[in-house]
Amino acid sequence: MEKIKMDFMGSHHSYEILIDNGILDELASRIKAVYSHYKVYIITDKNVASYYLEYIKNLLKDDFIVNEVIVDGGEEAKSLQVYQDVCLQLLNMNIRRNELLIALGGGVVGDLTGFIAATLYRGLPYVSIPTTLLAQMDSSIGGKTGVNLGNMKNVLGAFKQPSLVLIDPLVLKTLPRRHYNNGMGELIKHACIGNANIIKMLYQQDEIDTKIIYQSLMVKRRFVLNDEFDQKERMKLNFGHTFGHLLELDKKRFDLLHGEAVCIGMLMAIQFGIDLGITEQSCYQKLQYILEKYQLPTTKVNYQEYLPLITKDKKNLAGTIHFILIKDFGQSLIYDIFESDL
Ligand SMILES: NC(=O)c1ccc[n+]([C@@H]2O[C@H](COP(=O)([O-])OP(=O)(O)OC[C@H]3O[C@@H](n4cnc5c(N)ncnc54)[C@H](O)[C@@H]3O)[C@@H](O)[C@H]2O)c1
Ligand SMILES: [Zn+2]
Protein backbone atom coordinates (compact mmCIF):
# COMPACT_ATOMS: atom_id res chain seq x y z
CA MET A 1 0.00 0.00 0.00
CA GLU A 2 1.15 3.52 -0.76
CA LYS A 3 0.33 6.21 1.77
CA ILE A 4 0.39 9.97 1.34
CA LYS A 5 0.06 12.20 4.36
CA MET A 6 -1.49 15.60 3.78
CA ASP A 7 -0.43 18.10 6.42
CA PHE A 8 -1.15 21.71 5.78
CA MET A 9 1.29 24.12 7.33
CA GLY A 10 -0.34 26.39 9.83
CA SER A 11 -3.70 24.68 9.82
CA HIS A 12 -5.06 21.95 12.04
CA HIS A 13 -6.40 19.51 9.48
CA SER A 14 -4.36 16.63 8.14
CA TYR A 15 -5.48 13.47 6.42
CA GLU A 16 -4.21 10.42 4.60
CA ILE A 17 -4.55 9.23 1.04
CA LEU A 18 -4.24 5.46 0.85
CA ILE A 19 -3.61 3.77 -2.50
CA ASP A 20 -3.86 0.04 -3.04
CA ASN A 21 -5.57 -2.54 -5.19
CA GLY A 22 -8.47 -3.78 -3.07
CA ILE A 23 -8.11 -1.12 -0.35
CA LEU A 24 -11.90 -0.71 -0.39
CA ASP A 25 -12.25 -4.10 1.28
CA GLU A 26 -10.89 -2.37 4.38
CA LEU A 27 -13.38 0.48 4.09
CA ALA A 28 -15.16 -0.03 7.42
CA SER A 29 -12.02 -0.18 9.55
CA ARG A 30 -10.44 2.70 7.67
CA ILE A 31 -13.48 4.87 8.30
CA LYS A 32 -13.62 3.87 11.95
CA ALA A 33 -10.08 5.14 12.34
CA VAL A 34 -11.18 8.67 11.43
CA TYR A 35 -14.85 8.73 12.51
CA SER A 36 -16.46 7.73 15.77
CA HIS A 37 -20.21 7.91 15.08
CA TYR A 38 -22.56 5.37 13.49
CA LYS A 39 -24.36 7.04 10.67
CA VAL A 40 -22.82 7.60 7.25
CA TYR A 41 -24.32 9.13 4.11
CA ILE A 42 -23.06 7.95 0.74
CA ILE A 43 -23.43 10.38 -2.14
CA THR A 44 -22.95 8.84 -5.58
CA ASP A 45 -24.23 8.98 -9.15
CA LYS A 46 -26.52 6.45 -10.87
CA ASN A 47 -23.76 5.04 -13.00
CA VAL A 48 -21.31 4.43 -10.18
CA ALA A 49 -24.17 3.19 -7.98
CA SER A 50 -24.97 0.50 -10.54
CA TYR A 51 -21.43 -0.87 -10.26
CA TYR A 52 -20.40 -0.25 -6.68
CA LEU A 53 -23.14 0.88 -4.30
CA GLU A 54 -24.24 -2.58 -3.14
CA TYR A 55 -20.61 -3.63 -2.72
CA ILE A 56 -19.83 -0.55 -0.60
CA LYS A 57 -22.98 -0.87 1.48
CA ASN A 58 -22.15 -4.49 2.21
CA LEU A 59 -18.72 -3.50 3.42
CA LEU A 60 -20.21 -0.97 5.83
CA LYS A 61 -23.40 -2.62 7.03
CA ASP A 62 -21.99 -4.37 10.11
CA ASP A 63 -20.43 -1.21 11.53
CA PHE A 64 -22.58 1.69 10.35
CA ILE A 65 -26.10 2.78 9.63
CA VAL A 66 -25.78 3.55 5.93
CA ASN A 67 -27.86 6.12 4.08
CA GLU A 68 -27.52 7.04 0.42
CA VAL A 69 -28.31 9.84 -1.97
CA ILE A 70 -28.05 9.10 -5.69
CA VAL A 71 -27.80 11.90 -8.25
CA ASP A 72 -27.97 11.73 -12.04
CA GLY A 73 -24.45 11.51 -13.45
CA GLY A 74 -22.61 14.09 -15.50
CA GLU A 75 -21.52 17.68 -15.12
CA GLU A 76 -25.18 18.76 -14.67
CA ALA A 77 -24.98 17.32 -11.16
CA LYS A 78 -22.64 20.16 -10.23
CA SER A 79 -25.52 22.63 -10.11
CA LEU A 80 -27.20 24.63 -7.36
CA GLN A 81 -30.40 22.71 -8.04
CA VAL A 82 -28.78 19.34 -7.38
CA TYR A 83 -26.84 20.80 -4.45
CA GLN A 84 -30.13 21.93 -2.92
CA ASP A 85 -31.88 18.61 -3.64
CA VAL A 86 -29.12 16.61 -2.01
CA CYS A 87 -28.95 18.90 1.03
CA LEU A 88 -32.73 18.63 1.48
CA GLN A 89 -32.59 14.84 1.20
CA LEU A 90 -29.83 14.75 3.82
CA LEU A 91 -31.81 17.05 6.12
CA ASN A 92 -34.89 14.87 5.66
CA MET A 93 -32.78 11.94 6.82
CA ASN A 94 -32.04 14.00 9.95
CA ILE A 95 -28.36 14.27 9.31
CA ARG A 96 -26.45 15.82 12.25
CA ARG A 97 -23.59 18.24 12.02
CA ASN A 98 -20.93 15.75 13.07
CA GLU A 99 -22.03 12.92 10.79
CA LEU A 100 -20.01 11.67 7.86
CA LEU A 101 -20.56 12.05 4.12
CA ILE A 102 -18.92 9.59 1.74
CA ALA A 103 -18.24 10.76 -1.83
CA LEU A 104 -18.36 7.69 -4.08
CA GLY A 105 -17.69 8.63 -7.69
CA GLY A 106 -15.73 10.74 -10.12
CA GLY A 107 -14.78 14.39 -9.94
CA VAL A 108 -18.40 15.47 -10.25
CA VAL A 109 -19.59 13.59 -7.18
CA GLY A 110 -16.37 14.59 -5.41
CA ASP A 111 -16.79 18.31 -6.04
CA LEU A 112 -20.49 18.27 -5.17
CA THR A 113 -20.08 16.21 -2.00
CA GLY A 114 -17.09 18.25 -0.90
CA PHE A 115 -19.06 21.47 -1.34
CA ILE A 116 -21.94 20.07 0.68
CA ALA A 117 -19.45 18.95 3.33
CA ALA A 118 -18.02 22.48 3.37
CA THR A 119 -21.34 24.26 3.67
CA LEU A 120 -24.12 22.17 5.20
CA TYR A 121 -24.29 23.19 8.87
CA ARG A 122 -21.14 25.20 8.06
CA GLY A 123 -19.20 21.99 7.65
CA LEU A 124 -19.40 18.21 8.02
CA PRO A 125 -16.63 15.61 7.78
CA TYR A 126 -16.33 13.59 4.58
CA VAL A 127 -14.42 10.67 3.18
CA SER A 128 -13.60 10.49 -0.49
CA ILE A 129 -13.62 7.37 -2.67
CA PRO A 130 -12.64 8.62 -6.13
CA THR A 131 -13.66 6.17 -8.86
CA THR A 132 -12.29 7.82 -12.02
CA LEU A 133 -8.60 8.15 -12.83
CA LEU A 134 -9.12 11.90 -13.07
CA ALA A 135 -10.62 12.08 -9.59
CA GLN A 136 -7.89 9.81 -8.20
CA MET A 137 -5.09 11.75 -9.90
CA ASP A 138 -6.33 15.24 -9.52
CA SER A 139 -9.34 16.15 -7.41
CA SER A 140 -8.43 13.86 -4.50
CA ILE A 141 -5.65 16.26 -3.52
CA GLY A 142 -6.06 19.95 -2.99
CA GLY A 143 -9.37 20.44 -1.23
CA LYS A 144 -11.09 22.33 -4.01
CA THR A 145 -14.82 21.74 -4.02
CA GLY A 146 -17.68 23.47 -5.75
CA VAL A 147 -20.51 23.66 -8.23
CA ASN A 148 -21.15 25.48 -11.48
CA LEU A 149 -23.42 28.47 -11.91
CA GLY A 150 -25.21 28.56 -15.25
CA ASN A 151 -22.50 27.69 -17.74
CA MET A 152 -19.69 29.04 -15.56
CA LYS A 153 -17.62 26.21 -14.15
CA ASN A 154 -16.63 26.01 -10.50
CA VAL A 155 -17.51 29.61 -9.70
CA LEU A 156 -19.16 28.71 -6.39
CA GLY A 157 -16.92 26.76 -4.11
CA ALA A 158 -14.90 26.32 -1.00
CA PHE A 159 -11.66 24.76 0.13
CA LYS A 160 -12.51 21.72 2.23
CA GLN A 161 -10.19 18.86 3.07
CA PRO A 162 -11.59 15.35 3.47
CA SER A 163 -10.90 13.17 6.53
CA LEU A 164 -9.58 10.35 4.36
CA VAL A 165 -9.15 9.43 0.68
CA LEU A 166 -9.14 5.82 -0.45
CA ILE A 167 -7.82 5.16 -3.95
CA ASP A 168 -8.53 1.69 -5.28
CA PRO A 169 -7.23 1.33 -8.84
CA LEU A 170 -9.35 -1.81 -9.28
CA VAL A 171 -12.48 0.32 -9.72
CA LEU A 172 -10.93 1.76 -12.88
CA LYS A 173 -11.58 -1.55 -14.65
CA THR A 174 -15.17 -0.49 -15.35
CA LEU A 175 -14.27 3.05 -16.40
CA PRO A 176 -14.94 3.75 -20.10
CA ARG A 177 -11.79 4.25 -22.20
CA ARG A 178 -12.23 7.96 -22.84
CA HIS A 179 -12.77 8.73 -19.18
CA TYR A 180 -9.62 6.79 -18.45
CA ASN A 181 -7.75 8.93 -20.99
CA ASN A 182 -9.12 12.00 -19.29
CA GLY A 183 -7.20 11.10 -16.14
CA MET A 184 -4.09 10.09 -18.08
CA GLY A 185 -3.75 13.67 -19.31
CA GLU A 186 -3.40 14.94 -15.73
CA LEU A 187 -1.12 12.08 -14.73
CA ILE A 188 1.29 12.81 -17.57
CA LYS A 189 1.07 16.52 -16.76
CA HIS A 190 2.31 15.79 -13.23
CA ALA A 191 5.23 13.87 -14.74
CA CYS A 192 6.10 16.78 -17.04
CA ILE A 193 6.07 19.48 -14.38
CA GLY A 194 7.47 17.67 -11.41
CA ASN A 195 8.98 14.21 -11.84
CA ALA A 196 10.98 12.99 -14.83
CA ASN A 197 11.07 9.53 -13.28
CA ILE A 198 7.37 9.07 -14.04
CA ILE A 199 8.15 9.71 -17.70
CA LYS A 200 10.67 6.86 -17.49
CA MET A 201 8.12 4.58 -15.84
CA LEU A 202 5.60 5.43 -18.56
CA TYR A 203 8.21 4.49 -21.17
CA GLN A 204 9.03 1.18 -19.52
CA GLN A 205 5.64 -0.04 -18.33
CA ASP A 206 2.50 -0.78 -20.24
CA GLU A 207 0.08 -0.26 -17.41
CA ILE A 208 -0.62 2.31 -14.77
CA ASP A 209 0.03 0.77 -11.37
CA THR A 210 -0.18 2.01 -7.78
CA LYS A 211 3.44 3.21 -7.92
CA ILE A 212 2.78 5.52 -10.85
CA ILE A 213 -0.40 6.81 -9.27
CA TYR A 214 1.51 7.44 -6.05
CA GLN A 215 4.38 9.27 -7.75
CA SER A 216 2.01 11.38 -9.78
CA LEU A 217 -0.05 12.36 -6.73
CA MET A 218 3.14 13.24 -4.89
CA VAL A 219 3.82 15.88 -7.53
CA LYS A 220 0.44 17.48 -6.98
CA ARG A 221 0.95 17.21 -3.22
CA ARG A 222 4.22 19.11 -3.48
CA PHE A 223 2.66 21.97 -5.41
CA VAL A 224 -0.44 22.13 -3.24
CA LEU A 225 1.02 21.80 0.25
CA ASN A 226 2.80 25.12 0.42
CA ASP A 227 0.07 26.84 -1.48
CA GLU A 228 -3.16 25.63 0.06
CA PHE A 229 -5.18 28.58 -1.20
CA ASP A 230 -3.89 28.64 -4.76
CA GLN A 231 -1.65 31.69 -4.94
CA LYS A 232 1.51 30.81 -6.87
CA GLU A 233 3.18 27.37 -6.99
CA ARG A 234 -0.12 25.75 -7.81
CA MET A 235 -0.16 27.66 -11.08
CA LYS A 236 2.34 25.14 -12.42
CA LEU A 237 -0.44 22.56 -12.32
CA ASN A 238 -1.90 24.54 -15.20
CA PHE A 239 0.75 23.20 -17.57
CA GLY A 240 -0.97 22.27 -20.83
CA HIS A 241 -4.18 23.87 -19.61
CA THR A 242 -3.92 27.34 -21.12
CA PHE A 243 -4.04 25.96 -24.65
CA GLY A 244 -5.97 22.88 -23.55
CA HIS A 245 -8.92 24.94 -22.31
CA LEU A 246 -9.11 26.77 -25.61
CA LEU A 247 -9.21 23.50 -27.56
CA GLU A 248 -11.83 22.12 -25.17
CA LEU A 249 -14.02 25.13 -25.93
CA ASP A 250 -13.38 24.99 -29.68
CA LYS A 251 -16.26 22.56 -30.27
CA LYS A 252 -16.40 23.26 -33.99
CA ARG A 253 -12.93 21.86 -34.46
CA PHE A 254 -12.49 19.36 -31.62
CA ASP A 255 -14.46 16.95 -29.49
CA LEU A 256 -12.16 16.50 -26.54
CA LEU A 257 -12.58 15.69 -22.88
CA HIS A 258 -10.64 17.94 -20.53
CA GLY A 259 -7.66 15.61 -20.03
CA GLU A 260 -7.48 14.83 -23.73
CA ALA A 261 -7.33 18.54 -24.53
CA VAL A 262 -4.57 18.89 -21.94
CA CYS A 263 -2.52 16.29 -23.86
CA ILE A 264 -2.54 18.41 -27.01
CA GLY A 265 -2.16 21.56 -24.89
CA MET A 266 1.06 20.15 -23.40
CA LEU A 267 2.49 19.49 -26.84
CA MET A 268 1.62 23.08 -27.82
CA ALA A 269 3.21 24.48 -24.66
CA ILE A 270 6.34 22.45 -25.32
CA GLN A 271 6.55 23.73 -28.90
CA PHE A 272 6.04 27.28 -27.60
CA GLY A 273 8.85 26.73 -25.08
CA ILE A 274 11.17 25.30 -27.73
CA ASP A 275 10.55 28.33 -29.96
CA LEU A 276 11.31 30.63 -27.02
CA GLY A 277 14.56 28.75 -26.44
CA ILE A 278 13.45 27.62 -22.99
CA THR A 279 12.36 24.01 -23.47
CA GLU A 280 14.73 21.17 -24.29
CA GLN A 281 14.04 20.19 -27.93
CA SER A 282 13.75 16.44 -27.39
CA CYS A 283 10.78 16.88 -25.02
CA TYR A 284 8.35 17.18 -27.91
CA GLN A 285 9.08 13.82 -29.49
CA LYS A 286 9.38 12.06 -26.16
CA LEU A 287 6.00 13.31 -25.01
CA GLN A 288 4.45 12.54 -28.37
CA TYR A 289 5.75 8.97 -28.12
CA ILE A 290 4.24 8.49 -24.66
CA LEU A 291 0.89 9.95 -25.66
CA GLU A 292 0.75 7.62 -28.66
CA LYS A 293 1.77 4.65 -26.56
CA TYR A 294 -1.20 5.23 -24.23
CA GLN A 295 -3.56 5.99 -27.13
CA LEU A 296 -3.97 9.63 -26.23
CA PRO A 297 -4.55 12.40 -28.77
CA THR A 298 -1.50 14.01 -30.40
CA THR A 299 -3.14 16.18 -33.06
CA LYS A 300 -0.62 18.79 -34.20
CA VAL A 301 -2.08 22.23 -33.54
CA ASN A 302 -0.22 25.45 -34.23
CA TYR A 303 -0.03 27.29 -30.90
CA GLN A 304 0.30 30.64 -32.68
CA GLU A 305 -3.33 30.39 -33.74
CA TYR A 306 -4.44 30.21 -30.12
CA LEU A 307 -2.02 32.67 -28.51
CA PRO A 308 -4.27 35.71 -29.11
CA LEU A 309 -7.20 33.93 -27.45
CA ILE A 310 -5.36 33.41 -24.16
CA THR A 311 -6.16 36.87 -22.87
CA LYS A 312 -9.84 36.01 -22.79
CA ASP A 313 -9.34 33.04 -20.44
CA LYS A 314 -10.80 33.86 -17.03
CA LYS A 315 -7.93 32.17 -15.20
CA ASN A 316 -5.65 35.02 -16.12
CA LEU A 317 -5.48 38.20 -14.08
CA ALA A 318 -5.72 41.36 -16.13
CA GLY A 319 -2.48 42.58 -17.70
CA THR A 320 -0.16 39.61 -17.29
CA ILE A 321 -0.52 36.00 -18.31
CA HIS A 322 1.33 33.47 -16.22
CA PHE A 323 2.19 30.80 -18.75
CA ILE A 324 3.59 27.50 -17.58
CA LEU A 325 6.54 26.06 -19.48
CA ILE A 326 8.97 23.25 -18.80
CA LYS A 327 12.74 23.43 -19.24
CA ASP A 328 12.88 19.66 -19.33
CA PHE A 329 10.74 16.89 -17.86
CA GLY A 330 10.36 17.50 -14.15
CA GLN A 331 11.35 21.17 -14.31
CA SER A 332 8.57 23.72 -14.71
CA LEU A 333 8.58 27.48 -14.57
CA ILE A 334 6.17 30.38 -14.71
CA TYR A 335 6.76 32.53 -17.78
CA ASP A 336 5.07 35.92 -17.71
CA ILE A 337 3.61 37.24 -20.93
CA PHE A 338 2.29 40.79 -21.04
CA GLU A 339 -1.04 41.15 -22.77
CA SER A 340 0.33 44.06 -24.74
CA ASP A 341 2.96 41.74 -26.27
CA LEU A 342 0.42 39.40 -27.80
N1 LIG B 1 -11.65 19.56 -7.25
C1 LIG B 1 -10.64 19.47 -8.06
O1 LIG B 1 -9.50 19.74 -7.71
C2 LIG B 1 -10.89 19.01 -9.47
C3 LIG B 1 -9.81 18.70 -10.29
C4 LIG B 1 -10.07 18.25 -11.57
C5 LIG B 1 -11.38 18.12 -12.01
N2 LIG B 1 -12.41 18.43 -11.19
C6 LIG B 1 -13.80 18.29 -11.63
O2 LIG B 1 -14.04 16.93 -11.90
C7 LIG B 1 -15.14 16.84 -12.79
C8 LIG B 1 -14.87 15.75 -13.80
O3 LIG B 1 -14.63 14.55 -13.12
P1 LIG B 1 -14.64 13.16 -13.87
O4 LIG B 1 -13.89 13.26 -15.13
O5 LIG B 1 -14.25 12.15 -12.87
O6 LIG B 1 -16.16 13.02 -14.35
P2 LIG B 1 -17.43 12.29 -13.72
O7 LIG B 1 -17.45 12.35 -12.25
O8 LIG B 1 -18.60 12.83 -14.45
O9 LIG B 1 -17.20 10.77 -14.16
C9 LIG B 1 -17.17 10.45 -15.53
C10 LIG B 1 -18.17 9.34 -15.87
O10 LIG B 1 -17.67 8.10 -15.41
C11 LIG B 1 -18.64 7.43 -14.61
N3 LIG B 1 -17.87 6.66 -13.64
C12 LIG B 1 -17.22 7.11 -12.55
N4 LIG B 1 -16.51 6.14 -11.99
C13 LIG B 1 -16.72 5.02 -12.73
C14 LIG B 1 -16.25 3.68 -12.65
N5 LIG B 1 -15.33 3.31 -11.74
N6 LIG B 1 -16.69 2.80 -13.56
C15 LIG B 1 -17.56 3.17 -14.54
N7 LIG B 1 -18.03 4.42 -14.68
C16 LIG B 1 -17.61 5.33 -13.77
C17 LIG B 1 -19.48 8.55 -14.04
O11 LIG B 1 -20.75 8.08 -13.67
C18 LIG B 1 -19.53 9.50 -15.22
O12 LIG B 1 -20.50 9.10 -16.13
C19 LIG B 1 -15.31 18.20 -13.42
O13 LIG B 1 -16.50 18.77 -12.95
C20 LIG B 1 -14.12 18.97 -12.93
O14 LIG B 1 -14.39 20.35 -12.74
C21 LIG B 1 -12.18 18.86 -9.94
ZN1 LIG C 1 -7.02 19.66 -15.53
Image: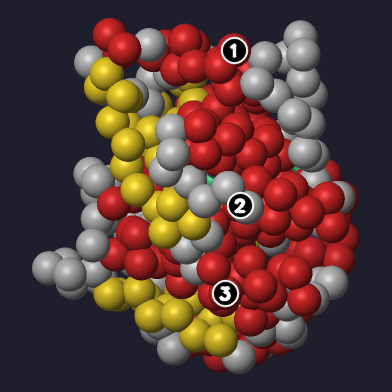
Q: Where on the picture, by quarter, is residue 143?
A: bottom left
Residue 131: x, y in percent? 69, 61
Pick out the residue farthest to the left: 10
Residue at 58% across, 22% down: 303
Q: Quadrant of residue 168?
A: bottom right
Mark 3 C-beta closer than 8 Å to ligand 2 = no
Quarter of the rendering containing residue 243: top right
SS label for mark 2: helix
Left or right side of 7 for 33: right
Q: Residue at x 78, y 31 (%)?
A: 299
Residue 113: x and y in percent read 50, 50
**215 or 9, which lies in front?**
215
Residue 42 coordinates in the image, percent (x, y): 60, 60
**Tag 2 near tag 3, CB within 8 Å:** no
Q: CA distance from mark 2 to mark 3?
A: 14 Å
Numbered circle sitting on residue 305: 1
Give the amino acid at mark 3: Asn
Q: Which callout, 2 or 3, points at the residue further toward the start of the chain? A: 3
Q: Is residue 47 above or below residue 52?
A: above
Q: Which residue is mark 2?
A: 283
Q: Residues within 10 Å of mark 2 (few under 14, many from 20)?
A: some
Question: Which corner quadrant holds the N terminus?
Answer: bottom right
Q: Out of 152 and 78, give the one closest to the viewer.
A: 152
| Residue occupied by mark 3 | 197
Mark 1: amino acid: Glu
In the picture, the quarter occupied by the C terminus is top left
**Label 3 element class:** helix
